[in-house]
Image (cartoon, rainbow, N blue to C red):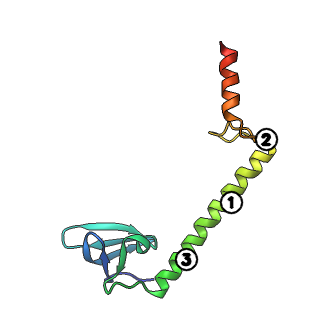
């Protein structure tokens, strides 16, 4: 989608004009400043079209972005579960055992050092 010269509204900076679209980045010129936003994420939290709406195309891009992010989260979760089932230690998860006896294992380690 071409955004150059598109009028947008920001919650804090007011109305601005997209002056540059480069990849997934939009540079918007407001009265007193220029800001760079990530597309389409900026339209989820910060920007709307000047009339306060968000176009169907932007909504479609937002939904696609959310689905892609969810796929990454799901894949990472599946990898972590697979690693745990195989007994592979995940950094930061070394002291957690499957039964949830983390506190008991810590107290046993402490007693052994005494």
**Could you say which is closer to the camera, residue 107 or residue 71?**
107
Residue with the most extreme right position = 86
In the rendering, at what x and y percent does residue 6 appear?
33, 83
Q: Which residue is drawn at 68% across and 35% down?
A: 102
Q: Residue at x 49, y 81 (%)?
A: 59
Q: In this view, does 21 lie above or below 107?
A: below
User: In terms of secondary structure, where does tag 3 sit?
Assistant: helix
Sooner in the amino-acid sequence: mark 2 or mark 1: 1
User: In terms of secondary structure, where does tag 2 sit?
Assistant: loop
Mark 2 vs mark 1, CA separation in Å: 18 Å
Where does label 2 land, which residue? 87
Within 10 Å of the Cα at label 3, are there few (<14), some (14-19), or many (20+) other Cα atoms?
A: some
Where does label 1 land, which residue? 75
Position of 87 with respect to 105 (left or right) is right
Q: Quadrant of residue 91?
A: top right
Q: Is residue 94 above or below residue 16?
A: above
**Could you say which is closer to the camera, residue 33 or residue 89?**
89
Q: Residue at x 66, y 40 (%)?
A: 93
Whether residues under marks 1 and 3 lie with C-beta atoms below 8 angstroms apart, the answer is: no
User: In terms of secondary structure, where does tag 1 sit?
Assistant: helix
Whether residues under marks 3 and 2 lie with C-beta atoms below 8 angstroms apart, the answer is: no
Mark 3 vs mark 2, CA separation in Å: 36 Å
Q: In this view, does 86 lie above or below 18?
A: above
In the rendering, at what x and y percent does residue 54 appear?
41, 83
Where does label 3 land, which residue? 63
Sooner in the amino-acid sequence: mark 3 or mark 2: 3
Quadrant position of the N terminus in the picture:
bottom left
- Count the marks: 3
Mark 1 vs mark 3, CA separation in Å: 18 Å
């Amino acid at each position: 989608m071409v955004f150059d010269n598109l009028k947008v509204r920001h919650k804090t900076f007011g109305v601005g004009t997209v002056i540059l679209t480069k990849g997934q980045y939009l540079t918007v010129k407001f009265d007193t400043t220029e800001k760079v936003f990530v597309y389409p994420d900026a339209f989820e939290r910060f920007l709307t079209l000047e009339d306060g709406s968000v176009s169907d195309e932007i909504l479609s891009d937002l939904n696609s972005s959310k689905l892609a992010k969810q796929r990454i989260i799901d894949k990472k979760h599946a990898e972590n579960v697979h690693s745990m089932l195989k007994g592979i230690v995940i950094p930061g998860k070394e002291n957690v055992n499957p039964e949830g006896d983390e506190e008991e294992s810590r107290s046993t380690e402490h007693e052994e050092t005494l």
